[in-house]
Amino acid sequence: MNGSIRIGNLFGIPFYLHPSWFLVLALVTWSYGGLLAGNFPGLGVVLPWLLGLVTALLLFSSVLAHELGHSVVAIRQGIEVKSITLFLFGGLASLEKESKTPAEAFWIAIAGPAVSLVLFILLTFIGVTTQLSGSLAAIVGLIAQLNLILALFNLIPGLPLDGGNILKALVWKITGNPYKGVVFASRVGQFFGWVGVAIGLLSVFEIINFGSIWTLLIGWFLLQNAGRSAQSATIQNQLTNLKAEDAVIPNSPIVSGDLSLREFANEYIIGKREWSKFLVTDAEGQLLGAIAVDDMRNIPTSDWSITTVRELMQPIETSTIVKSDQSLLEVVMLLEQEQLNQLSVVRENGVLVGLIEKTSIRNLLEQRAQTNPV
């Protein structure tokens, strides 16, 4: 999340606090500190607010434990956890990639609520079997209840909640298509989002006596994030059904290695589109390397006629080359992971197809959307 503050690592996982977390920390401290001051006047003036702060920190520790539940299962599946962020509405574990099977996705999703339920049972057991009393008993009881609420709320079957990820896994298992699972669970999430917004608005205008401004905010949060999930899944599904060669730039910057630099300049540079780099092929069309236009400055113009493109070209890293029949989704992931702007596309026999860029992928998706509107 933008603006998040990194405060350290937990089990090797970067841990962040979003600025909105401090707002909730202050609100919980203030509200529960005031409640303790009213119910336990013997605590004095300062202690209730300190206990309110402790309660707020315990609440966020519970949220953190919930996210660590997801993270531990993901790590055991070989999925890297990029970060855990605490923010206004709870926590978020950012995973490197999706699970490979619906069963694995299910176990990651259920792990968070399972941790919260275990904490509820453990804290309830402590409260019942020990001699806790007064404010300490009240705090333990509250944190136990909040863990139960955290588990049950997250089991609502709509994205981006854990219940939505469980529903996604079930639909994925039935249909065999993970993206159908995401879209379906996102639509359900949007439904619950609208319900939350409606209840929140009705409560704000005192038409009903349950719900609050928080219900409205949570509903809006569900609505927005569920919509993004559905849109993302739709795009990923399209990318899965497309190949790298489908998004190759028409008239990609390709030049024969046998050309002289003079021919190269006359035919491809002077008065032409301003490409800063060209891919170089041999007589059979196989990719040899790349030549940067700026590198020609190192060669005297008097030698351009006797110097070939092949002599000036540089090799291309294999990490920037993809196969023509490779899924366009894999191509996009490679572009993002390696922070690249373009890739070379070749066939199995090494023959160059052309160049692919983020803009050419975006243009392809826009063209398909216009041709096949939803």
Image: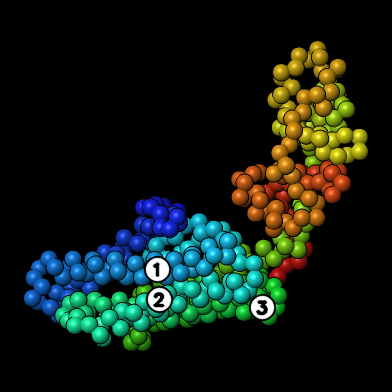
Write down the residue under mark 3. 173
Location of residue 135 (image quadrant):
bottom left
Q: CA distance from mark 2 to mark 3?
A: 26 Å
Residue type for callout 1: Ala
- Residue at 73%, 27% (x, y): give it: 293
Location of residue 46 (image quadrant):
bottom left
- Residue at 87%, 46% (x, y): give it: 349
Query: Mark 1 packing: few (<14 Cα in 10 Å), some, or many (20+)?
Result: some
Describe the element under mark 1 as helix, strand or loop.
helix
Residue type for callout 2: Ser
Q: How many marks?
A: 3
- Residue at 65%, 54% (x, y): give it: 333
Q: Is residue 320 left or right of residue 129?
A: right
Could you say which is closer to the camera, residue 185 or residue 43? 43
Residue type for callout 3: Lys
Location of residue 90 (image quadrant):
bottom left
Measuring from the top left, give residue 64's x and y in whole percent. Answer: 39, 66
Mark 2 or mark 3: which comes first in sequence?
2
Query: In this orientation, does residue 271 appear?
Result: no
Write down the residue under mark 1. 65
Mark 1 or mark 3: which comes first in sequence?
1
Measuring from the top left, give residue 367's x and y in whole percent. Answer: 75, 58
- Residue at 62%, 46% (x, y): give it: 338
Could you say which is closer to the camera, residue 356 or residue 178? 178
Q: Is residue 44 left or right of residue 182?
A: left
